[in-house]
Amino acid sequence: MRELWNLGWVGGLTAIGFLSVYTARQNEISSASLTYAGVFLAVFGLAHIGVRAGLPHADPWLMPLAALLCALGLTEIYRLSPTLARDQSVWVVIGLLGFLAMIFLVRDHRRLEPYTYLLATTAVGLLAVTMVVGTTVNGAKLWLRVGGVQVQPGEFAKLLLVVFLASYLREHREVLQMAHRRILGVGLPAARHLGPLALMAGVSLGVLGIMNDLGTALLLFGIYLAMIYVATGRHLYTVLGLGLFAAGSWAVYHGVAHVHERFQVWIDPWAHPHTSGYQVIQSIEAIADGGVFGTGLGRSLQVLNHGQTIIPAVQTDGIYAAWADETGLAGAAGLLLIYLLFCYRGFKIAAIAGDGFSKLLACGLTFAFGLQAFLIVGGIIRLIPLTGITLPFVSYGGSSIVSNFMMLALLLMVSNRAVERA
């Protein structure tokens, strides 16, 4: 009941958001916003029924939080382009269908454990195919074209990687702890003990060097370091992993022009204000323009009369800046608070899970979600180099929406199992 009640609040906020944007765009008040909100609430209401039928004891807060993020994203995308908002709505429906399919076909996340090596091979295969035949967009080779649809395999690779690591680390945790003691005793650990760490560093650096994708490289390797730390409790693996990645990144920085340019823009975007630094500068100015409470939904200068946006790729990379412009510091902080609440619920699920695989899976999924949000927001505000990945559930993009709903389904399966045991 709490889940349905919270979804009702989300539907109300969606109505207010679409009403504000529609009024600003059309200069008239219309009931169209109620239609948008009603359809949104109906779709997520059906998802709620499916969750309660398949996972009756699942966490009641995660899906409303995901729905709220989707609502905020759709509202802002509609403000930028109604056509893009229509396409994003279709992807949300597809994502929810995949979400329900996972719940009813898998039901118990532990069924995936015997297939973890197959999943890992699939993840590496997706990245390898992208490296070979992927489409380059804005200097990064992120996409595969399947018919008339573009797919971003890295979004699904991260999900498969988390499932594999949860099983692998649960099985080899004691071996890794023994290797840790051997390293501290100044002995040479067996290659098989540190092999996976070196392999993950290699895969991540391959993504960085060949695909020119700093965001996916940081995301994949960050997930691995976080999960190995949770599994072993040893800081040494984190230090070694960061050292390997830093050394490889230094080499890639000097050898790959696109990565070098990303770092130069991060250090001083005003050195190239009309070319590579333009997106970062416009994002920072948009955030500053929002002030404390923003200009109002639909009232900031985001789209020119001929349809060109002020911030390049604003619907994907720069949507946080657009949201901060129109809702101010208060709205931007509220958006980050939603992500923190989502991560809190995810880590709480991990804490109450009864077996190692479930704990590691919940931790990995939650960390992947939180780290991805940090990477894109940190890039927009120049805390780190701009990575170009999507803001989960908010940015425009079908691959991101579908993969995040699949992650949500797995988290709900873990929570359902944990509560049943309790």
Image (spheres, helix red, strand yellow):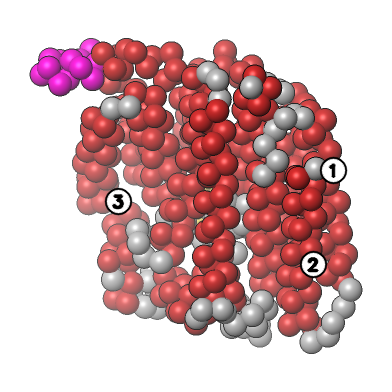
**Residue designated by label 3:** 256
Q: Amino acid at mark 3?
A: Val
Front-most of residues 207 and 53: 53
From the top left corner, tell me how far across and down residue 383 is, in percent: 35, 62
Q: Is residue 294 above or below residue 316?
A: below
Judge whether residue 187 is colored magenta: yes
From the top left corner, tell me how far across and down residue 308 is, in percent: 60, 77
* Left or right of 406 on screen, residue 385: left
Is residue 52 visible from the viewing direction of this image? Answer: yes
- Packing grade of label 1 (10 A; few <14, some 14-19, many >=20) is few
- The tag earlier along the polypeptide, 2 or 3, is 2
Name of the residue lying farthest toward the front = 422
- Tag 3's secondary structure? loop
Q: What is the C-alpha distance between the residues marked 2 and 3?
A: 47 Å
Name the residue at 61% across, 43% down: 404
**Residue designated by label 2:** 15
* Left or right of 388 on screen, residue 105: right
- Packing grade of label 3 (10 A; few <14, some 14-19, many >=20) is some
* Left or right of 246 on screen, residue 319: right
Judge whether residue 306 is colored magenta: no
Quadrant of residue 183 within the rendered picture = top left
Discs 1, 2 touching: Cβ within 8 Å: no
Name the residue at 45% across, 53% down: 374
Q: Nearer the viewer, mark 2 or mark 3?
A: 2
Q: Which residues are magenta?
A: 179-190
**Residue designated by label 1:** 46
Q: What is the tally of numbered marks visible in this picture?
A: 3
Q: Nearer the viewer, mark 1 or mark 3?
A: 1
